[in-house]
Amino acid sequence: MTEPVSAFYSICPLLVASNLAVELGWLDEEFERAGATARYLRSLPGNGGWLSHFDHSQAGLIRDGGATPALWARAEHRDTVLLATTATQRAGQILVRADGRIRQVADLFGKRIGVPVSRNVQRIDVLKVVAEQGITSALALADLQPGQVRLVPIEDEGDPHDLLPARRPAALWAQLRGLHSGPGAELQALAEGRVDALHVSYGHVPKLLASGQFSVIEDLERYPDWTLKNQNGPYVTTVDRAFAEAHPEVVVAFLRAAIRAGRWIAEFPEAAASLLTRVTFLPGAAFIAESLRGRDLVPNLAPRNLAALQLKQDFLLRHGYLQQAFDVQAWAQPDYLAQAHAGL
């Protein structure tokens, strides 16, 4: 008997079908069918998997999640293959204090906008990228340039290093749910008047508005222009090329599980929303169900998603987050996804 192939997987706490494939047991099922075993990256002792989630340095890793680290890893660190994309991201909002005088983005001329900056310099600063891109888009809509406002760096806590190993994503996120339940130090800076505005992710907004302390002056989600909703999406599924070429059946197994889960989500959105509370930091099943409306979680390589990744790479290059470019179209390898669909 041959030993089963062992592969690692890592999934961001986002609205991607692979998260439910794990929760429903379908990832293990499909891996077993392919003669493989799936090991969660963050089960490694001593918090050993956290950096690999960003730079893709762990051999045999399949990663599903935000586009920013995946683009950075491909450009700077690892020869990866793009397997699939998922466009479920929502655009952010510009938040101000409710008791202030700022009522539109144009009022931010010369004002201070807080930007989170991670203490951890070993990986790309995802929150800073998301904030800067959202702020740049909002300013452009008001005919303002970034140089016409003051971007104020606000140090965040970085990555916790005292997390316990977790066998599944839900167990890891349970340790971090309090930390990620809202914006960090930058929200305190806004509340205290040290900055005049912030870019905030859509999941944090309902709780902040309910407090009565804050108001939204711009919602990038309301525009028909899809390029304004590109701060951290589309989400991407990637694998290191050497592993994919050596074990294509394992890669296809991961995609099969995600496709099954994506179809199940479309059929049972309310049940899916309930389960997704375990593997995201979004505020409750009702909010997730609303967020899923009109979104397709079946992994794909749609042309617009690839165009969005090219725009994201362009932004990262212009702002110095990447030092070199690569061909996004060539990064995508559709054969694995086609085989996964054919095998179902």
Image (spheres, grey):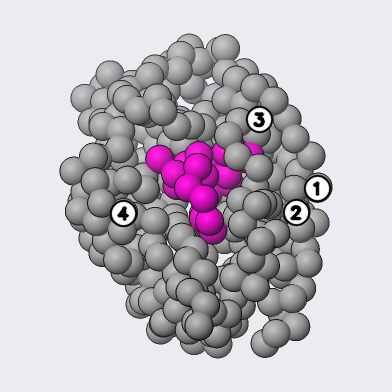
- In the image, what residue type sits under mark 4? Leu
Closer to the eye: label 1 or 4: 4
Badge 3 marks a residue whose secondary structure is: helix
Give the label on residue 44, or none.
Answer: 4
The crowding category of the residue bearing disc 1, from other C-alpha atoms within 10 Å (few below 14, some 14 to 19, many at least 20), is: few
For this view, does 139 lie left or right of residue 176? right
Closer to the eye: label 4 or 3: 4
Q: Tags 4 and 2 in contact by the CB under 8 Å rule?
A: no
Residue range of the region highlighted in magenta in the rendering: 51-74
User: Is 48 rendered above or below residue 99?
Assistant: below
C-alpha span from label 1 to label 4:
33 Å
C-alpha span from label 4 to label 3:
33 Å
Dot placed on the residue nearer the N-terminal end, 1 or 4: 4
Dot placed on the residue nearer the N-terminal end, 4 or 3: 4
User: Is residue 342 among what the camera can see?
Assistant: yes
Front residue of 147 and 338: 338
C-alpha span from label 3 to label 1:
17 Å
> Going 30% across and 37% down the picture, which residue do you hit?
159
Magenta highlight on residue 64:
yes
C-alpha span from label 2 to label 1:
6 Å
**Residue identified by numbered label 2:** 332
* The C terminus sits in image quarter: bottom right
Which quadrant of the structure image shows residue 170? bottom left
Residue at the front extreme, as displayed:
1
- In the image, what residue type sits under mark 3? Phe
The crowding category of the residue bearing disc 2, from other C-alpha atoms within 10 Å (few below 14, some 14 to 19, many at least 20), is: some
Dot placed on the residue nearer the N-terminal end, 2 or 3: 3
User: Is 226 rendered above or below residue 95?
Assistant: below
**Residue identified by numbered label 1:** 329
